[in-house]
Amino acid sequence: MQALDRMPPGADPALAAEIDRLAGVAAKLAHRIARGGIDEALGGAVGTNTDGDAQKALDVIADEAFMEALRGGAVRHYASEEQDAVVVLNPQGRFAVAIDPLDGSSNIDTNVSIGTIFGIYPAEDTTGASFLRPGRDLLASGYAIFGPQCALLMTLGDGVLKYVLDPETGRFTLTAAPAPIPADSIEYAINASNYRHWNAPIRAYVDDRVAGAEGPTGHDFNMRWIASLVAETHRILTRGGIFLYPSDARPGYLHGRLRYVYECAPIAFLVEQAGGRATDGQERILDAVPDALHARTPFVFGSANKVARVATYHDLPAEETSALFGKRGLFRA
């Protein structure tokens, strides 16, 4: 290991080597981000990606850095948010890496936490077979978060590992394993500006949280929204709660906005390993099969009991999902 101080005993050495390559790039990006504005303008617009999302300079820098670092290893297929199609790195490689090289890039200039999301699958003969598969097939997934502290959280399918970047050595140090996601939390994260576009069950769920102690839940809640999936995930892994990015009625949002292959599946795999749950609002995300590399999906994840509660709102009679309905069936004895 060069970027990571160690891996857990029994880890596949070849898989560990690829994760170490990813960690090495993350460490360099953390340093570069910390110097943003001194040497270069990392938040400058440089175009759009295949889905029409605005690209920042750091999006492209990160994508090229990860791709180059993985090129000399055991990765056969590389799927990135910033690439139109899968890139073949090593035709004999064992692994397929799905990556969002720079998540939350709209926050670069505001000094809000941003990050990198990755998932690693066993490589198949074709690029489609490597990535158009259920997320439960993942071998490993995780994220690096670039904030006041640079940390790397990941799973090899057996619990969650947490590393913290030591700025003095430039290496990630394994720390104590995070506790399971707390079941009790008064926080939920959703972009409330889209309220008018949501379907009735999601509106009802949020209405009941807004109503607080005077509503059917009998509790007050706090809303959070960072517009950085990595930052939202890190908060939930730390202190529980729930994140919702549902589908809505706007053009291009019918199937949600977040991408399955390199955003939702890797995060869901990690969240489940931390004792949480991840769904599309009703069904388990890791059982879904994307039909395209950049396929989108609604995404709800966090404390298991809270995610399960969202699903129950979809089972209510239509009249009970009207605004601020006082006695929804799921609260009756």
Image (spheres, rainbow, N blue to C red):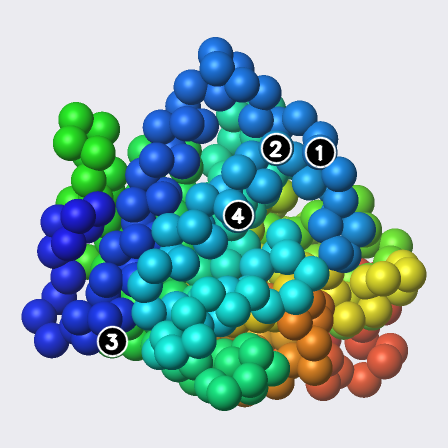
Residues under labels 2 and 3: Cα distance?
Answer: 36 Å
Q: Position of residue 76 (x, y in %)?
A: 43, 72
SS label for mark 4: helix
At x 30%, y 76%, the residue is 157
Q: Marks 2 and 1: CB-CB under 8 Å?
A: yes
SS label for mark 2: helix
Which label is found at residue 158?
Answer: 3
Give residue 71's quadrant in the image. bottom left
Give residue 273's quadrant in the image. bottom left
Looking at the image, residue 118 sits to the left or right of residue 215; the answer is left
Q: Tell me if mark 3 has few (under 14), some (14-19) or many (20+) residues whose alpha carbon lies within 10 angstroms of its own.
A: few
Residue highlighted by disc 1? 46
Residue highlighted by disc 2? 57
Against 305, residue 259 (above or below) is: above
> As shown in the figure, which amino acid type bears the numbered disc 2?
Ala
Q: Mark 3 or mark 1: which comes first in sequence?
A: 1
Q: Position of residue 235 (x, y in %)?
A: 43, 48
SS label for mark 1: strand
Looking at the image, residue 323 sits to the left or right of residue 103; the answer is right
Residues under labels 2 and 4: Cα distance?
Answer: 10 Å
Residues under labels 2 and 1: Cα distance?
Answer: 6 Å
At x 50%, y 59%, the residue is 99
Q: Tell me if mark 2 has few (under 14), some (14-19) or many (20+) residues whose alpha carbon lies within 10 angstroms of its own.
A: some
Q: Tell me if mark 4 has few (under 14), some (14-19) or many (20+) residues whose alpha carbon lies within 10 angstroms of its own.
A: some
> As shown in the figure, which amino acid type bears the numbered disc 3?
Asp
